[in-house]
Image (cartoon, rainbow, N blue to C red):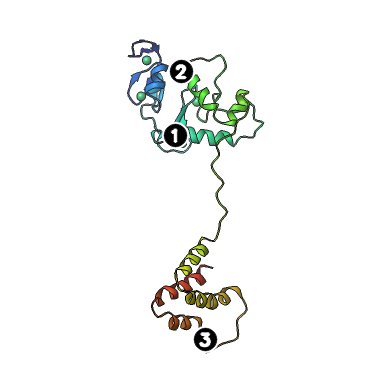
């Protein structure tokens, strides 16, 4: 037990591990949002604490954090991701603190700055709104990753487009058979595609040549 140094002089048993001061809940929310805060007794037992998020093991300070009513602190993204993976019919009591198994949802009779900040955060995501008995909302979801498309290919067309029509003709004529037909073609000694390219491309021989091999090897 100790006194918070703020004007309220609140009696508190919370202790910021980071700043090594007693803090009341008001000050905790206002000034120690990313600090490990537990009881002073806990501090005595655990002074070589880790200030990493327990879910991803990277520093808490690096990302937005959320403190549960047990005062355990996590990255909001990590906690949210974990909770969102639970089945939709999970009872509210099934959402538990990953550290101490305390409730994620603040008990309804619990008031205080930590609980109200947490409740507010929880109303932004549907798994929690369901647990709080709130109507669901349209969550902001990150756009679906675009289906893998042939970016190689589009690079190609733009590359070809920059060349003369003649170049384009030669390129398609020489490369298309090579990768569209698996059947070995009968030998046609006089017209090897590469040689053709070299002959016709007086100015841009290396580019077209490299292009031809690149296309074949990327398939
Ligand atoms: Zn205070
Ligand atoms: Zn602090
Ligand atoms: Zn994390
Ligand atoms: Zn906890």
From the image, state whether disc 3 or disc 2 is nearer to you.
3
Q: Residue at x 51, y 60 (%)?
A: 151
Instruction: Name the one closer to the observer, 71 or 148.
Output: 148
Distance of label 3 from label 2 (alpha carbons): 81 Å
Q: Position of residue 100 (x, y in %)?
A: 51, 26
Q: Position of residue 20 (x, y in %)?
A: 33, 22
Q: Which residue is mark 2?
A: 113
Left or right relative to 171: residue 130? right
The residue at the far right in this view is 89
Q: Are marks 3 and 2 in contact (CB under 8 Å)?
A: no
Instruction: Name the one closer to the observer, 208 or 186.
Output: 208
Q: Earlier in the sequence, mark 1 or mark 3?
A: 1
Q: Residue at x 44, y 32 (%)?
A: 64
Dividing the image into 4 quarters, which one contains the C terminus?
A: bottom right
Which numbered disc covers residue 53?
1
Instruction: From this view, report whether residue 207 is shown above or below residue 30.
Output: below
Within 10 Å of the Cα at label 3, are there few (<14), some (14-19), or many (20+) other Cα atoms? few
Q: Position of residue 124 (x, y in %)?
A: 54, 29
The residue at the far front in this view is 165
Q: Are marks 1 and 2 in contact (CB under 8 Å)?
A: no
- Is ligand 1 within 8 Å of the beta carbon of the residue shown at mark 2? no
Dividing the image into 4 quarters, which one contains the N terminus?
A: top left
From the image, state whether disc 1 or disc 3 is nearer to you.
3
Instruction: Name the one closer to the observer, 136 or 7.
Output: 136
């Amino acid at each position: 037990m100790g006194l918070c140094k703020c004007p309220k002089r609140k009696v508190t048993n919370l202790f910021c591990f980071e700043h090594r001061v007693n803090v009341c809940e008001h000050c905790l929310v206002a000034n120690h949002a990313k600090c490990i805060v537990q009881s002073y007794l806990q501090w005595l037992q655990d002074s070589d604490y880790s200030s990493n998020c327990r879910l991803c093991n990277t520093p808490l300070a690096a990302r937005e954090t959320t403190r549960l009513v047990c005062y355990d602190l996590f990255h909001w993204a990590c906690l949210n991701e974990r909770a969102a993976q639970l089945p939709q019919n999970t009872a509210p009591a099934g959402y538990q603190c990953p550290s101490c198994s305390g409730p994620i949802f603040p008990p309804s009779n619990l008031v205080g700055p930590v609980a109200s900040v947490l409740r507010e955060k929880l109303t932004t995501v549907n798994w929690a709104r369901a647990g709080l008995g709130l109507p669901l909302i349209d969550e902001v979801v990150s756009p679906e990753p675009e289906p893998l498309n042939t970016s190689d290919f589009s690079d190609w067309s733009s590359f070809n487009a920059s060349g003369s029509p003649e170049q384009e003709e030669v390129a398609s004529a020489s490369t298309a058979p090579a990768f569209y037909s698996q059947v070995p073609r009968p030998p046609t000694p006089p017209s090897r595609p590469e040689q053709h390219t070299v002959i016709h491309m007086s100015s841009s021989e290396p580019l077209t040549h490299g292009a031809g091999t690149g296309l074949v090897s990327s398939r």
